[in-house]
Amino acid sequence: MPKMKTKSGAKKRFKMTATGRVKSAQAGKRHGMIKRTNKFIRNARGTTTLSKQDENIVKKYMPYAR
């Protein structure tokens, strides 16, 4: 059987944690920062883990990232 391919966009955007969760950048920070509250901007720093439902989708894109 040939190897499965990893989606190129997924490998650039997501990383796996040691426990198997999916890490990603915080959403909603590309533009429009003037209308965002300071609390939103502060809480959206760094990375976050995806929800279980989204995680299952991303794991299909990255078959060897576990």
Image: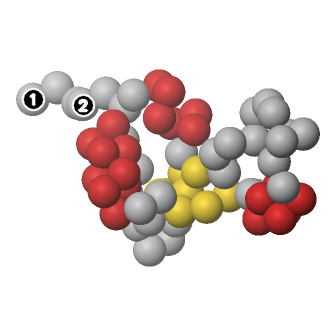
Q: Position of residue 8 (x, y in %)?
A: 47, 25
- Decide: is 14 above or below 3: below
| Residue shown at the point (33%, 37%) measured from the top left | 61
Q: Which residue lies furthest to the front in this view?
A: 35
The quadrant of the rendering that contains the N terminus is top left
Q: What residue type is labelled 2?
A: Met
Whole-number angstrom distance, CA of label 2 to CA of label 1: 9 Å
Q: Position of residue 58 (x, y in %)?
A: 37, 45
Q: Which of marks 2 and 1 is in front?
A: 2
Q: For residue 28, which quarter of the picture? A: top right
Q: Position of residue 2 (x, y in %)?
A: 17, 26
Q: Mark 2 points at which residue?
A: 4
Kind of element beneath mark 2: loop
**Is 31 on the left or on the right of 65, as rendered?**
right
Of residues 34 and 42, the one nearer the viewer is: 34
Q: Where is residue 7 in the image (x, y as percent from the top left)?
A: 39, 28
Tell whether label 1 touches label 2 (CB within 8 Å): no
Which mark is on residue 1? 1
Whether residue 7 is visible, yes or no, is yes
- Decide: is 65 above or below 61: below
Whether residue 59 is visible, yes or no, is no
| Residue shown at the point (30%, 45%) measured from the top left | 57
Q: Which residue lies furthest to the left in this view?
A: 1
| Residue shown at the point (50%, 27%) measured from the top left | 9
Q: Residue furthest bottom?
A: 19
Q: For residue 44, which quarter of the picture? A: bottom right
Q: How crowded is mark 2: few (under 14 residues within 10 Å), some or many (20 or more)?
A: few
The quadrant of the rendering that contains the C terminus is bottom left
Q: What residue type is labelled 1?
A: Met
Kind of element beneath mark 1: loop
Q: How many labels does the image show?
A: 2
